[in-house]
Image (cartoon, rainbow, N blue to C red):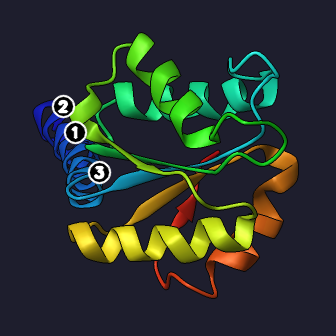
Amino acid sequence: MKIFRISFVALIFLTIFSCKSNVEEKRLPGETLIVLGFPANDDGTASEVMKMRLDLALEIYQNKKVSTIIVTGGAVQNSYPEAEVMRNYLIEKGVKSSEIIMEKEAKSTFENAMKARKILKKYGLKNPIIVTTPEHRERAANIFRLFISEFRMAE
């Protein structure tokens, strides 16, 4: 009877573990990050808000949950395109330049979403994870729903 209980508990544990593993494996292939821009500092370095978004993107990237990072944002408040500043920051932190796609024309969240959709289609990317700051998350999600049917917000 004791061996039966141990076997039963082990079977339940293995079932739960294998189900969780399968869900994660299905979620990973083909996913990409879309990091929404925020104005750079006047000297062309990443601002604190931009760093917050990029550090979250790095955490997801380093956990091997994505293979491509789209950085989106033009030069909104100064002459430095947000996408270029973000790309440089990510490369300095170890992301391969070949895994970064820049979109450096968008001047608003609406344009971020519209232009990101074109990039997703062009490169055949799916299941994007949108990276922004917590206070911007709901607004960004509402805008992205207009352009992309399946995505999730990074937390």
Q: Is residue 118 left or right of residue 39?
A: left
Which residue carries the number 3 mark?
24
Q: Mark 1: which secondary structure? A: helix
Report if the CB atoms under discs 2 and 1 are less than 8 Å apart.
Answer: yes
Amino acid marked by disc 1:
Arg
Which residue carries the number 2 mark?
2
The residue at the point 80 percent across, 46 percent down is: 134
The quadrant of the image that shows the C terminus is: top right
Q: Is residue 53 above or below residue 140?
A: above
Q: Is residue 78 left or right of residue 132?
A: right
Q: Is residue 80 above or below residue 116?
A: above
Residue at mark 3 to residue at mark 1: CA–CA distance: 29 Å
Closer to the chain start, of discs 3 and 1, is 1
Q: Position of residue 77 (x, y in %)?
A: 84, 42
The residue at the point 77 percent across, 23 percent down is: 47
Between residue 19 and residue 61, name the one nearer to us: 61
Amino acid marked by disc 2:
Lys
